[in-house]
Image (spheres, rainbow, N blue to C red):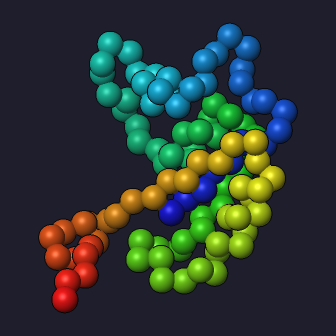
Amino acid sequence: MELASYGRGGGQRKGEDNSIWNIQHRCKNGVPCDSATTSVKGMQAYIPQTTFAPGCKDVPCNSTHGYGEAIEVAKRADTAVLIAGLSLTEETEDHNRVTE
């Protein structure tokens, strides 16, 4: 889980639309970009004031150790973005649900 937030003071470059849709679709004519990046690095490229707190250190997220910092970062932000997902170790049938 990643938490990215945008601090006060803007960050949008003059003449640019920095909506998430436009950040994800910068490549032209439907041709995929030639390099991959993380969600946070992608946002920081267009919104330099982006701050980051990981929250969880791994996919199972069994520890709440990083939650405090992530919550404080979100409280100070104008906007907070939570990025969460499953890895292939979790995203298989029977591994991500509990049955009796």
Task: Say which residue appears at 71% left-offset and 73% top-offset.
Answer: 68
Position of residue 83 measured from the top left corner of the image (x, y, whole percent):
50, 54
**91 or 33, nearer to the observer:** 91
The answer to which image quadrant residue 30 occupies is top left
The answer to which image quadrant residue 89 occupies is bottom left
Position of residue 96 measured from the top left corner of the image (x, y, whole percent):
26, 73
- In the rendered view of the protein, which quadrant contains the C terminus? bottom left
Position of residue 34 measured from the top left corner of the image (x, y, whole percent):
37, 32
**45 or 16, nearer to the observer:** 16
Position of residue 10 measured from the top left corner of the image (x, y, whole percent):
78, 30
Task: Say which residue appears at 64% left-offset and 74% top-offset.
Answer: 66
Number of labelled discs? 0
Task: Say which residue appears at 76% left-offset and 42% top-offset.
Answer: 78
**88 or 68, nearer to the observer:** 68
Residue that sits furthest to the left in the current view: 93
- The image shows residue 38, relative to residue 64, as above or below, that is above
- The image shows residue 12, relative to residue 7, as above or below, that is above
